[in-house]
Image (cartoon, grey):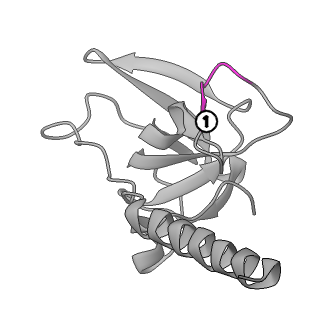
């Protein structure tokens, strides 16, 4: 019954608990929003894109599991959205892509009861690639 052995047992036990907690938490990949049926009732011009905010952009969780509402602002934070429509001069982004943009550089529009954001292609900071579009891509570049 030495003190050192008891401390090691507790350390191993707490590490095992932390490991089991880590395996229990699963993060669901972001799902693309349900797109409107048929063509959009608006034709986008030039380099304009119509996007729907990703559900995770509305509110998020800290590493400790604390829910942070969308109204809490922490410096400059980029947001993710799914592209639902593109103009004729948009070259590198297509419908269904998940894009990263600055939420302060946006215009909101309501079409058929659904709120969309209107962006320019140059306002997009990045596009999630291939299979990584369905995985957690993080909040920072």
The span picked out in magenta is: 66-72
Question: What residue is at 65 percent from the left and 18 percent from the top?
Answer: 71
x%, y% of residue 13?
Answer: 57, 73
Which residue lies most toward the left here? 37
x%, y% of residue 137?
Answer: 57, 65
Total numbered badges shown on the rendered structure: 1
Answer with the quarter of the image where residue 2 lies: bottom right
- Label 1 CA crowd tier, 10 Å (few <14, some 14–19, many 20+): few
Q: Quadrant of the C terminus?
A: bottom right
Given residues 112 and 131, the one toward you in this image is 131
Tell me if residue 32 can be seen.
Answer: yes
Image position of 24 (left or right of 106): left
The stretch drawn in magenta includes residue 105: no
Question: What residue is at 58 percent from the left and 43 percent from the top?
Answer: 65
Image position of 125 (left or right of 111): right
Question: Is 105 drawn above or below residue 130 in the view shown?
Answer: above
The stretch drawn in magenta includes residue 70: yes
Which residue lies most toward the right here? 75
Given residues 45 and 118, the one toward you in this image is 118
Q: Quadrant of the N terminus?
A: bottom right
Tell me the element at label 1.
Answer: loop
Answer with the quarter of the image where residue 73 lies: top right
Image position of 114 (left or right of 23): left
Main SS category, magenta section: loop
The residue where tag 1 is placed is 66
């Amino acid at each position: 019954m030495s003190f050192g052995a008891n401390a090691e047992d507790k350390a191993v036990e707490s590490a095992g608990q932390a490991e089991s907690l880590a395996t229990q938490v699963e993060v669901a990949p972001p799902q693309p929003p349900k797109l409107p049926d048929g063509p959009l009732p608006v034709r986008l011009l030039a380099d304009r894109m119509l996007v729907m905010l990703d559900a995770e952009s509305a509110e998020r969780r800290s590493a400790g599991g604390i829910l942070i509402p969308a109204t809490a602002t922490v410096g400059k934070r980029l947001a993710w959205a799914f592209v639902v429509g593109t103009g004729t001069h948009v070259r590198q982004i297509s419908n269904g892509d998940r894009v990263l943009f600055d939420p302060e550089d946006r215009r909101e529009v309501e079409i058929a009861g659904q709120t969309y954001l209107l962006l320019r292609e140059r306002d997009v900071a990045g596009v999630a690639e291939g299979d990584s579009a369905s995985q957690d891509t993080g909040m920072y570049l």
